[in-house]
Structure formats: structure tokens, C-alpha cells
Amino acid sequence: MPTQNGNSSRFYRLGTACARNPLKVLAAWAVLLVLAGALATQFLGGLSGSSNVVTGSDSQRASELISDKFDSSSTESDLVVFDSDSLTVDDPAYRSAVEAALNAVRSGDHVLNVTSPYAEGAEQQIAGDRRTAFAAVGMDGSDSELQSQATTFQERVASAVQNHEIDAYFTGYAPISAASVAQGNEDLARAESIGLPLALLVLLVAFGTLVAAGLPLLLGIFGVVLAFGALGVASFFTDFDVFVQSVVSMVGIALGIDYSLFIVTRYREERTRSDGSRADDVAAIGRTMATAGKAVLFSGSTVLISLAGLLIVRAPVVQTMAAGMMAAVAVMVVVTLTLLPALLGLLRGRINKFAVPGLRGKVEHPDPQRSAWARWTRLVMRRPLMLGGLAAVVMVTALVPAFGIRFGVDLGVGAVADTPAGRGYELVSQRFAPGVITPVNVVVNSKDGSFDKADLNAVAGLTADLRDDARTEQAVSMTSVLDQRVGSHSPTALERFLESDNAQDLGELVNAQGNTGVIVVYPSVRAESDEAHDLVHTIRDSMAPSALSGGEGDSSSLEVYVGGSTAEIVDISAENARATPLVILFVLGASFLLLLLAFRSVLLPLKAIVMNLLSVGAAFGLLVLVFQEGVGASLIGAEEAGFIQVILPLFAFAILFGLSMDYEVFLVSRMKEEWAATGDNRAAVSAGITHTAGVITAAASIMVVVFASFMFTDVLENKQMGFALAVAVLLDATLLRLFLVPAVMRLLGPANWWLPRWLDRILPRVDLGDGR
């Protein structure tokens, strides 16, 4: 029996208090669930499409200047795309349909201006075959406002042209984002319909009873709803990417089931020592929380710290995703430490009700020493070099492809290709140029008042250079419009034009004060292509400096910033490269310190870090092999993307390192209990594996099926993240925990537990055992 000191621990008292007062605890959580359900709708209703903005970047500064300096600038420019198999733009019926659709658009909210393909000077909005055309719609408003009305605009334009042998599609950032959110919801529902039943099946096999199996699943779902509610509060102050919904659900359900599984397993083991009385059952719950409960808190802390490393990345999309996952982890830990012991106190012996036929032995004779895991452990103890070496070879072989990783950004258009927004995007890309929807905005700003002659000459020179570039379809600026309309781009010509009735023809190319302008560049290549990224680098590194330097002393002091979707992709890729080593160092350093405190050993934290890096690296290697190189991609319903999403490895690293530490804590803390009791390293390693291998394997199996279910969605980010997490957990729970970890610890012997005396004296004590 535990000592009085163990029974008096805070975790023991927390467990017994919740177990003695289950109805009060359940009532409190029921109230929170109702509130969370209401707030979750706020979170889910405010999700936006993917954003690649980087705080303090060149592209963000460009966007801020446009917003600050232009009195009535559009937040974005969307397109109404028209297409017909039988009519051309010259047919009266085609023109009538276009005018009807645009009148419907003009009457909508947040519409600033509409440029018809029939407008003067808009010939470039009509395709060469004259069967496809588009109108540009300038809009203002927040992302959520524009997304919420995108479907309405599509319905309006489709209704206006339905009897005219012509199709109309509303496309652009907001319509594609709205379609992405809808696709994300569909993906999540599909993944959960696959993952949750499979998770229940694994739990049934692990526990052998319906009640014990259903409890972790129930808590996992409960925790996700609470996490969505917490994010609903945060959504009043910030926007969340649609991908947050998927990762919070993915990680939240997996961890919620994981933690509950460990607690329920330990409780059933502790209850075998109970006489069946309520007092003894409550004491068993207290002992469970004083051991497995502590490990859950410590494990959750390691996951939180790993995810906190992502806050180093100066990109709101990364930071909000990290915050979302941290909220899910925190909620899961609190639910596990309070609600679960209350439910166990309510169920007591009924935890073993409704045994599954054929698995009754798991209920009646849960003796770890007679299990297959005990036999396996004895084999590893006898052949550590052979089995450990075999596992190491497999892991290193899987890791090798990771050295050839190529990063890219998928804008999510492929996942919504069958929607009106997706079809409109593809039509524009095929019949015009991809850059029509994703232009590059070169913002020029004068720090010394209105543009002078040198400034305007620099803008004209830069515009000409951009037009001559093979990667550019078209470039338009205030100087190109002035040269066309008045034959000069002098400061006087600009001033007179801005004061004339034709000032609107300069649109958003120059502000009313004449000190900030935009060169709108329409690339001939897609925003996510290497050629488009090279164009941004060329503008920043050579074109702009060359144009500003002028000639014969005619230099300009203009500030030049390059913005737009393409530039944002370039900037988030650069930020990813900058932040990656910092995130890795933070996570590794924090993990080492936490494990040093937990295990009071120098070698065990180092061993854990090396092992975890090996499993993460192997998962990345297989990710590259499948999604980048296309090896076996068709087997999982994926396509060769040719690249890995630029922010995915950082996310996967932080999540996987936290989850790996999760298993490490549960495994080694059990070994430490035995080491403290016996002083026998071999016995400690054997006992740790024997008592935890089954539950770790069950937990890992659940994580694998939950994560793998996201591989069968349509969004590339979900597919790649689901694959990386599922493969890494599978490798970690099998080759690492069953082969390498016990083999290495067997070979290290008592050195596993070595800690210098001076360090032992100064380190605070964190006991993950039973409180003794």
C-alpha cells in the first residue's frame, strides 16, 4: 500500500475529492459544456481561408500601406467569370447576361466598384476565343464579412445568367476561402466518421468491455467541444485559419482518448487491490491520480511546451494554430484530471460492465506478467543488440529521403476545384493568366511628400522592366496610364489628372495625395510556382534597386515593398527557414530540462531526444517519399504534390515531439517506480515495458487511426499532416518503444539513472511515482 505521504499528495486528494463528489463535478462540467457549445458556433462560423501573412514582412508592409494611404481602397478584388460554349462576348445575349449579373453584384454589400469587360480599356478582360470574360469587383470589409456573402454573390450571378446559355462564377480570395471552409467541414466530418468507430474498436480490444472502451472516446469528443468553445472566446479578438479546426480535432481527440486510456487502465489495475467497498474504490482512484494523473499533467506540459515553440514563428496563421492546439491540450488535461475521476467514482465496478465475448480475460485476469508483452520483453532483454540494431537500421533507412525535402505552398484551390469558385479560378488561369487572380502588388511610397520627377521616372522604368519580364503577363501603374492618356507622366500631369473628372481611371494605382502608388503585376505563372517566387526575388533584389538608382544623378528615394499572395508565400517560406532552427532548439532544450526533472537522470533525457528525433525524421522521410516523390501515393488516395507544405514540418515536429515525450513519460516513469523499489535496472526496464506496452500500443493504435483518417480528406494540408502524424506514432510505438528503447536501456544498465551529486542537490524534485 502507498505510504501516507503518497495518499496525502495533491493529486491523490484531487482524485478522491472528485470521486467522492461526482454529481457536483458533472454538474459543473455540464454547465461549461453548454457554454462551450454556444461559443463553438462563434469559432466555427468565423473560420477563414489560409493566410500566409508574416508579421513585419515586406509583403505585410505593402498591404498596410495600401490600407492606410488609400481612402477607399478595396480590401480585395474578386472576379465574376463568364463562359459559354455557344456564345461570344459579341452576341447581344452574352452582353445582356453579363449586364444582368453585374447589376446583381452592384446591389450587394461591401461592393466599391465593378469593372465590366465591356468597359473602355478593359479589352484584356476578354479571352482570345471571346467566349470567356471576367469582371473585376472591388470590395471592402473584413475577411469574415466577405466570406459570409460569397455564396450569396454566386447565387445572384448564377440566377442572372441561367437562361442565357452562359455560366457565371464568382471567384477570388473570399469565394475560394468560403469554399475551403465548407470543404474543411466536410473533410472533418468524413475523417471523424472513419476515425472514431475505428478508435472505439481498438478500445474494445484493449479493455474488453463496452463501458471502459466508451469512456475515453466520450471524453475525447467532450474535450474537443470544450476546446472549440475556448477558441470561440478567442475568435472575438483574432481570426482562425480553417486548418485550426482540423488540427484541434485531430490532436484533441487523440490526446483526450490517450490520457483517458492511461488513467482507466491504471484504475482497473489499482482496483484489483480493492475489496469492492466505496472507500476502497475511491482510494484506488486517488492512487491512480497520484501516479498516472501526475504523468498526464507532466506529459501535457511537455506537449504544451513543444507547441509553445511554434509561437517563435512570426506568422499569425502558425501562432493561432499553435494557440488552438495548446488550448485543446490544456482542456484535455483538465478534463482528464477532474471529470474522469468523477466518472470513475460514479461507475466504480461498473467500469467492467458489458464485456465483449472472447475478451473477458482482459476483465477477469488482467495479469501483465502473463501477457505476450512480458514474453516479448524477456526476448529483448536477451537480444538487445540484435533487435535494437534491426530497428535502428529500419528507422535510419526511412529517414534518408527527408534530406531531399522540397517546400512549397498549396493555396487549396485543388480541393475546391468542383465548386463555382474553383471552376472560375481554373477558367481564368487557363484562358488568361494565373496572376489575374493573384497579382503581385509593388507598392511605392514617397517619404518626402508628393512624387517628384525622379520618383515617377523610377516607377515608369520599373513598370517597363516588369512588362518585359517573361514571367509577367501585364504590369499596370499610374505612369503607364498617364503615358497612354496624356502622353506624359510628369508630376504636373499626375496632379492635373488627379484633379480632373477622370481621376477614377487611375483607380487604386495612386492615392489622392499623390505620394503612394501601386504597380499591379499580373504574373503569367501560378502564385505557388518557383517562377513566381523568383519574380518576387528579382523585383526586390535587382529590378527595384536598379529603377530607383536612375541615371545621371536622377535617383529616387522611394520606398518599395512587394506584396500580394505570391510575395506572402515567399515571405512565409523565408520565415519558416529562419524560425525552424530556433523552434527545434527551444523544443529540444525545454524537453531535456523537463525530462531531467522528471527522471533525475542525464542519459535518459538525451536518449529520449535522440530517439524522438529518429522517429520524427523517419516520418518525414516517408512523407517525402509518398507526397513529394509519389511512391505509393495512389495506395492512400493521394497524388504526387512535388513538395511538402512549407509550415507542415514545423507543426508536425512540435506535435510529434510532444506526443513522443508523452509515451516516454508513461513508459520511463513506470520503470523509475521499479528502479526506486528494486535498484535492478534490468527488472525496472522489464517491468516498465510489461506494464505499459499494452496500453501504449492501444493508445498509439488509436492515434494512428484518428490521424490516418485525415489522409482520406481532400485538402492537401490535412492529407500530409494526417500521414506524418500517423506514421510517426506508428514507428514510435513499435520500433522505438518495443525495440530501441528497451534495448538501449538494457545496454546502458545502471548508467540510465546516473545523476551527478551536485546536480541532484540543486534540482527540484518532481515525483511521477506513487508519491513515496
Image (cartoon, rainbow, N blue to C red):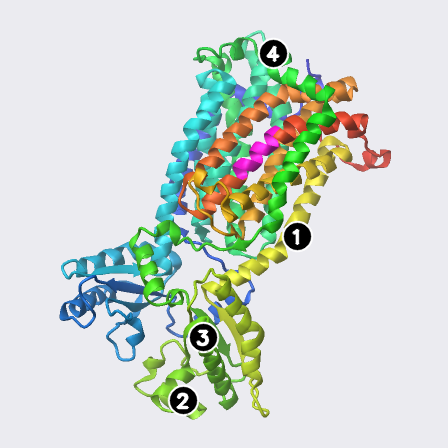
Quadrant of residue 40 within the rendered picture: top left
Element class at badge 3: helix
Q: How far is mark 2 from mark 4, CA to CA?
A: 89 Å
Q: How far is mark 2 from mark 1, CA to CA?
A: 50 Å
Residue type (three-letter) at the residue carrying disc 4: Asp
Residue type (three-letter) at the residue carrying disc 1: Pro
Nearest to viewer (mark 2 / mark 1): 1
For residue 495, the mark is 2
Q: Position of residue 74 (x, y in %)?
A: 37, 69
Q: Position of residue 344 (x, y in %)?
A: 51, 19
Quadrant of residue 104 within the rendered picture: bottom left
The residue that mark 3 highlights is: 69
| Span highlighted in magenta in the image | 725-734
The residue that mark 1 highlights is: 581
* Residue 592 seen in the figure: yes
Q: How far is mark 2 from mark 3, CA to CA?
A: 17 Å
